[in-house]
Amino acid sequence: MNEEETKVNQETSETEAVKEDVVNTADEATAAETEVAEAEAEQGRDDSALQEAQDRYLRLQADFANFKKRSANERLQLTELVKSEVLLSILPVLDNFERALQTPQDELTEEMKSFVAGYDMIYKQLVEVLAKEGVTKMEALGKPFDPLYHQAVMRIAHEEYADDTVAEVLQNGYLIGEKTLRPAMVKVVFNG
């Protein structure tokens, strides 16, 4: 029995060694699977972190582009506002030139006529400068009253014009492009 026992013992020890190898291999495989799973999870976290960073970058880029557009638009609006205010402050000077040039010429001396001619040249030059900036005089006389372009200061009866028509312009109105720079002060017909 000795030989059989030895053989059984050898087989048992070999079986135990094989079992131990299988267990070790299974443990190593489980450990490797765990490492792979952890690496994949970490890579997934890295990928999602990278995706989040890219999304934030794109949002920041879009926000910056919008900021630049908004700033440029605000700057343009501010420039237009300042330009309008400056041009509006010049209009009373233009009005005074027009009043001065409406004086009857036949009552003036030759010296005064030369002054008036000088005023006329300055007036024309001022009108040209304003025209270069897009300022034009409104044509209001005989037009239907429009509160966007006219400021009614009186209502009068008039035989020539229909109701709600501008019968007389007391102060000229001006446009800058298509926008009203200063409304015309007018008398409006009311035959009622």
Image (cartoon, rainbow, N blue to C red):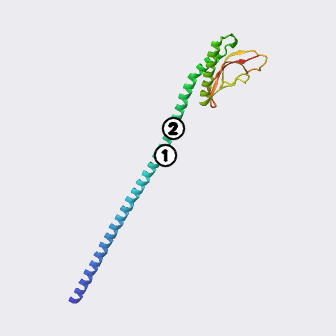
- Quarter-of-image position of residue 125: top right
Q: Position of residue 161 (x, y in %)?
A: 77, 20
Question: Tag 2: Cα neighbours inside 10 Å, few (<14), some, or many (≥20)?
Answer: few
Q: In what element is the residue under mark 1?
A: helix
**Closest to the observer: 183 or 48?**
183
**Residue nearest the observer in this picture, 123 or 75:** 123
- Front-most of residues 108 and 179: 108
- Image coords of residue 145 (percent x, y): 70, 23
**Badge 1 density bin: few <14, some 14–19, many ≥20, Cα 10 Å:** few
Q: Which mark is residue 62?
A: 1
- Direction from residue 19 to residue 73 in the image, left or right: right
Q: Which mark is residue 72?
A: 2
Q: How many numbered marks, from 0 up?
A: 2
| Residue at left offset 44%, top offset 49% | 57
Mark 2: amino acid = Ala
Q: Report x, y in % for residue 75.
A: 51, 34
From this view, report whether residue 71 is shown above or below residue 191. below
Q: Amino acid at mark 1?
A: Ala
Instruction: Give the foreground label among 2 and 1.
Output: 2
Q: Earlier in the sequence, mark 2 or mark 1?
A: 1
- State the quadrant of the C terminus: top right
